[in-house]
Each structure stands twice: as structure tokens, then as C-alpha cells.
Amino acid sequence: MEIRSSIEVRWFVDDASAEAKAARAWFRDVAPQSKREDHYLLTGRNDVGFKARVEEGLPAKLETKFLLGSLGPALLHERFVGHIERWRKLASPRRDVCGSSPTRTAWCAPSTSWTIPQRAAASR
């Protein structure tokens, strides 16, 4: 099991919005992170998150993330205001969750509350 802490800002915006276009331009020169697909369990809470991560060439992981605190809104770049947050994440590799080869459909069966957002991840 991995236990990690992070300081981060997250945005969830409509892909067609002006904010998404501006964010893509801002991160244009940043190398993308590894090829992966994240599946989020919808809980309706802002202080805890559950995620299944399928990353190319690695075993799938189940992650639980807890919000430890927030500095509140901060101007990050011209027109971007975001909350700088401190999180703690517990991640556990799971070879047995969906049998021997986890797939998108296994994580996200229609009868569950898991969802896959369209996303781009980058660190700056």
C-alpha cells in the first residue's frame, strides 16, 4: 500500500467551455502524464474520493483520497481561481478486483455509481 500527501488544485469544467480552452493553452507545453484511465465512485462528497486507476503496463489500483485542508480561493493564472488543497491518498494495487485483466467495462458496469470523466492531467 502506498500513502502519499499532495498539494493540488483541481478543476472540473465542461470540455467545450472557455475555461477548458484556456487551461489547455496554459498546459500546452507541459509533458502529459502516463497513459491512464481513472474511474471515480460518485459519493456526493467534496472531502473524500474513491478512484480506480488503470494505468498502462501496471496493475490496477484502488485509491482513497481524504481532504486535509484548503487555503481557499487563490488567483493562479490570469483568469484561473482555484482552491489550493492538501490531500492524503492511500493506494493499493488490485489484481483481483476484475479478474486477471481489469477493463473499463468491469470497473464501470451500468449498475454501479462509477464514472469516467474525460480528462487531461498535467503537473505544473
Image (spheres, grey):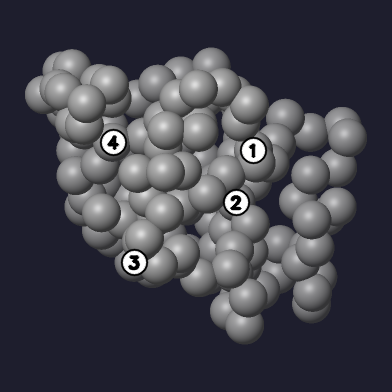
> Pointers 2 and 1 in contact (CB under 8 A)?
yes
**Separation (CA) of disc 2 from disc 1:** 8 Å
Q: Residue at x 63, y 57 (%)?
A: 37
**Separation (CA) of disc 1 from disc 3:** 24 Å
Question: Upstream in the sequence, badge 1 or badge 3?
Answer: 3
Q: Secondary structure at mark 3?
A: strand
Q: Position of residue 80 (x, y in %)?
A: 28, 25
**Closer to the observer: label 2 or label 3?**
2
Residue at numbered disc 3: 2
> Pointers 4 and 2 in contact (CB under 8 A)?
no
Question: Upstream in the sequence, badge 2 or badge 3?
Answer: 3
Examine the rendering and report whether any part of residue 12 can be seen: no
Q: Residue at x 36, y 61 (%)?
A: 30
Q: Position of residue 41 (x, y in %)?
A: 61, 35
> Pointers 4 and 3 in contact (CB under 8 A)?
no
Question: Upstream in the sequence, badge 4 or badge 1?
Answer: 4
**Separation (CA) of disc 4 from disc 2:** 17 Å
Residue at numbered disc 2: 38
**Separation (CA) of disc 4 from disc 3:** 21 Å
The quadrant in which the N terminus is found is bottom left
**What amino acid is at disc 1?**
Pro
Is 94 situated above or below 50?
below
Q: Residues within 10 Å of mark 4 (few under 14, many from 20)?
A: some
**What amino acid is at disc 3?**
Glu
Question: Upstream in the sequence, badge 4 or badge 2?
Answer: 4
The tag on residue 117 is 1
Residue at numbered disc 4: 9
Q: Residues within 10 Å of mark 1 (few under 14, many from 20)?
A: few
Left or right, 12 with reference to 47: right
Q: Position of residue 81 (x, y in %)?
A: 25, 21
